[in-house]
Image (cartoon, grey):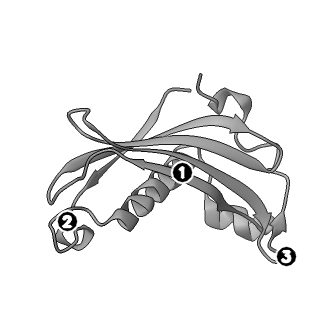
Amino acid sequence: MSLFTWPVRIYWEDTDAGGLVYHANYVRFLERGRTEWMRAQGIDQVELRERTGLGFVVREMNLDFLRPARLDDELLVSVAVKERRSASMLFHQDIARRDGSPLLKATVRVACVDLAAVRPAQIPGDLFFQEFLTP
């Protein structure tokens, strides 16, 4: 599967007093990218939760801040699946300006959990087939 990207524009609410994107907002942008990636795969997270009681939670995240984004910048959030295990997936994500200038690199491991018990659960076999892995 090719790299998935999702556009983000920076608004006043995303910036700090210095006019730069507040660091925690990058996590929101990464989350939106993964959510939209799932939606593009035809996965409705509400339906998944209602049907199976399962959901995905962030287990581990590593962020490398390279350059700041500023008000009105147009960004692209990319999503690539690097590994699929029985109960987790590892994503590589980038945030860059639309001109390709890199701003942030991230690795994110999400775990599939039984939401009622808040315990790890196997990812259903009909989700995220091997072809979603990127080289």
Q: Position of residue 73 (x, y in %)?
A: 17, 51
Residue at the spot x=69%, y=36% of the render? 83
Q: CA distance from mark 1 to mark 2?
A: 25 Å
- Identify which residue, 91 or 32, lies in the foreground: 91
Identify residue for label 1: 62
Amino acid tagged 3: Ala
Q: CA distance from mark 3 to mark 1?
A: 26 Å
Secondary structure beneath dot 2 equals loop
Identify residue for label 3: 117
Q: Are marks 1 and 2 in contact (CB under 8 Å)?
A: no
Identify residue for label 2: 11
Q: On the picture, is 80 further left or further right than 124?
A: left
Q: Nearer the viewer, mark 1 or mark 2?
A: 1
Outermost top residue:
135
Q: Position of residue 33 (x, y in %)?
A: 45, 51
Residue at the spot x=21%, y=48% of the render? 74
Amino acid tagged 2: Tyr
